[in-house]
Image (cartoon, rainbow, N blue to C red):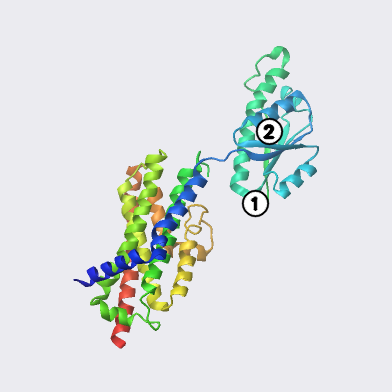
C-alpha cells in the first residue's frame, strides 16, 4: 500500500474508534450550523423596542403612534413625558430608539411648516438602530399623508408641492431585505474554516513524539503523500458540510446564486485544504499542538472581521489591510460573494481569489513537507 493509502486508512481507523474526534467532525459542525440556521431563520428584524415622546397629544400624534405600532419591525416600548425620561430607557436597554413628536404636529403639516420629528437611536447597536430608524421614518411619512388629508379644509387632497415631514435621525454614539442570505454566506464558511483549522491541527498533533514529527515521517514512506492521506478525511467532511449549508440556503430556504455554485463548492475545497496545510505548517514549526490551536483560533477566528465583507477596509490601518490579504478566508468570500451577482461580471473576477486559495495550499503544504523531511533526516 502506498504512503497515501496507509495514512488514509490509519486516519479512518482512528476516527472510527475515537468518539471525540468523530464528534468534532460531525456533531460540533451540525450543532453550530443548526444554531446559525435558527438565528437567521426569521431573516429580518421584528418588534424592535421603540420609546415615544408625545409632546403634541392630538389626533395627529396618535395617528403617528398607530402607524409606528403597525410596523412589523417596531414594538412601542412605552410613552414618556420628555426626552430625558425616554433617554433613561435607551441607556438601560429597554428601548433601542426614541421618537419625539413635537407640539403642533398636525397643524404644522397642514400649514406647510415642516414640523421636525426627532429620532434618536443607540449607535452601540448600529445595525438595529439604523433598521428601527428607517422603519420609523417610513411609517411616519406614510402617516403624514393621512394627517394632511384630515387637517386640510373639506378633507381635500394636499397639493403635490406641499412639504411632508422633516425627520431628523441622530445616532447616539446592510441594507438587504433579509439578513439570512447575506449573513449565511459569510458566517458558515467562517465557522467551518475554524473547525477545519482545529481538527487538522489535532490530527497531525497526535503524531508528535518528543516535540518532533521525525518518527512519524520515517514511518510513512513519503511525507507529502502521507500528509495528504492524513488530512483528506477532514477536508472532505468539512467541504461536505459546506455543500450541505449551500443546499440548505438554496433548496430549503429558496435563495439562489446567480453565478456558479460548482465554482463556489470547488473554492470551498481549496479553502479547507489550504487551512489543513496551514495547520500542518504551524505544527511543523511550533511542534506544539496547543500553540498551533491558539494560532488557528487567532487567524481563523479573526478572518471574518478582517474580510472587508462586514466592515470596509478602505481607509483602514496598514495592519488591517495587510492582515486581510494574508488570510485565506477573505479571498474565498471575495469569490463567493462575486457569484451572488451576475455571472458575466463575476466569472473573471473569480480567477484571482482562486489563484490565491491555491497558493495557500501549495506554499503551506510545501513548507510543512520540507520542515518535516529535514527533521526526519536529522534524527
Spot occupied by residue 116 in the image (x, y as percentages of width and height):
72, 34
Crowding at dot 2, Cα within 10 Å, few <14 / some 14-19 / many 20+, comes out as: some
- Mark 1: secondary structure: helix
Viewer-closest of 102 and 210: 210
Which quarter of the rendered picture does the C terminus lie within?
bottom left
Looking at the image, the residue that sits furthest to the bottom is 379
Q: Quadrant of the N terminus?
A: bottom left
To which quarter of the image does residue 327 belong?
A: bottom left
Q: Is residue 327 left or right of residue 131?
A: left
**x then y, percent, for residue 373:** 29, 80
Q: Residue at x 73, y 14 (%)?
A: 153
Q: Can residue 341 be seen? A: no
Q: Which residue occupies 43% across, 49% down?
A: 185
The residue under label 2 is 166
Secondary structure under tag 2 reads strand
Percent from the top left, x then y, of residue 346? 35, 47
Using the image, tell me which numbered label, if any, was put on residue 124: 1
- Is 43 left or right of 147, judged from the image as shown? left
Circle nearer the N terminus (1, 2): 1
- Seen in the picture, residue 351 relative to 248 is either above or below; the reply is below
The crowd level at tag 1 (other Cα within 10 Å; few <14, some 14-19, many 20+) is few
Where is residue 365 drawn, in percent x and y?
A: 32, 70
Amino acid at each position: 500500500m502506498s504512503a497515501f493509502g496507509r495514512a488514509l486508512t490509519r486516519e479512518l481507523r482512528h476516527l472510527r474508534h475515537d468518539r471525540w474526534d468523530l464528534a468534532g467532525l460531525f456533531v460540533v459542525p451540525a450543532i453550530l450550523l443548526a444554531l446559525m440556521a435558527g438565528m437567521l431563520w426569521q431573516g429580518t428584524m421584528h418588534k424592535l423596542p421603540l420609546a415615544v415622546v408625545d409632546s403634541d397629544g392630538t389626533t395627529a400624534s396618535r395617528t403617528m403612534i398607530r402607524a409606528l405600532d403597525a410596523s412589523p419591525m417596531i414594538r412601542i416600548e412605552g410613552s414618556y413625558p420628555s426626552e430625558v425620561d425616554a433617554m433613561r430607557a435607551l441607556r438601560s436597554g429597554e428601548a433601542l430608539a426614541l421618537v419625539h413628536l413635537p407640539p403642533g404636529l398636525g397643524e404644522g403639516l397642514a400649514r406647510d411648516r415642516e414640523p421636525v420629528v426627532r429620532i434618536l437611536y443607540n449607535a452601540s447597536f448600529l445595525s438595529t438602530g439604523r433598521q428601527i430608524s428607517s422603519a420609523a421614518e417610513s411609517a411616519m411619512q406614510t402617516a403624514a399623508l393621512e394627517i394632511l388629508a384630515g387637517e386640510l379644509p373639506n378633507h381635500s387632497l394636499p397639493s403635490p408641492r406641499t412639504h411632508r415631514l422633516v425627520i431628523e435621525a441622530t445616532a447616539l454614539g446592510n441594507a438587504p431585505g433579509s439578513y439570512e442570505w447575506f449573513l449565511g454566506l459569510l458566517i458558515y464558511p467562517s465557522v467551518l474554516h475554524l473547525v477545519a483549522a482545529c481538527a487538522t491541527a489535532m490530527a497531525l498533533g497526535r503524531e508528535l513524539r518528543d516535540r518532533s514529527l521525525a518518527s512519524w515521517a520515517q514511518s510513512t514512506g513519503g511525507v507529502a503523500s502521507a500528509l495528504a492521506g492524513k488530512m483528506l478525511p477532514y477536508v472532505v467532511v468539512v467541504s461536505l458540510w459546506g455543500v450541505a449549508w449551500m443546499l440548505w440556503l438554496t433548496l430549503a430556504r429558496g435563495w439562489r446564486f446567480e453565478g456558479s455554485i460548482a465554482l463556489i463548492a470547488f473554492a470551498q475545497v481549496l479553502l479547507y485544504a489550504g487551512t489543513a496545510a496551514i495547520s500542518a505548517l504551524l505544527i511543523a514549526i511550533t511542534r506544539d499542538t496547543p500553540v498551533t490551536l491558539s494560532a488557528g483560533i487567532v487567524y481563523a477566528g479573526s478572518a471574518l472581521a478582517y474580510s472587508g465583507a462586514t466592515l470596509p477596509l478602505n481607509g483602514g490601518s496598514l495592519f488591517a489591510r495587510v492582515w486581510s490579504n494574508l488570510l485565506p478566508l477573505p479571498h474565498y468570500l471575495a469569490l463567493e460573494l462575486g457569484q451572488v451577482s451576475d455571472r458575466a461580471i463575476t466569472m473573471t473576477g473569480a480567477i484571482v481569489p482562486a489563484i490565491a486559495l491555491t497558493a495557500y495550499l501549495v506554499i503551506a503544504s510545501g513548507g510543512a513537507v520540507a520542515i518535516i523531511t529535514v527533521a526526519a533526516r536529522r534524527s
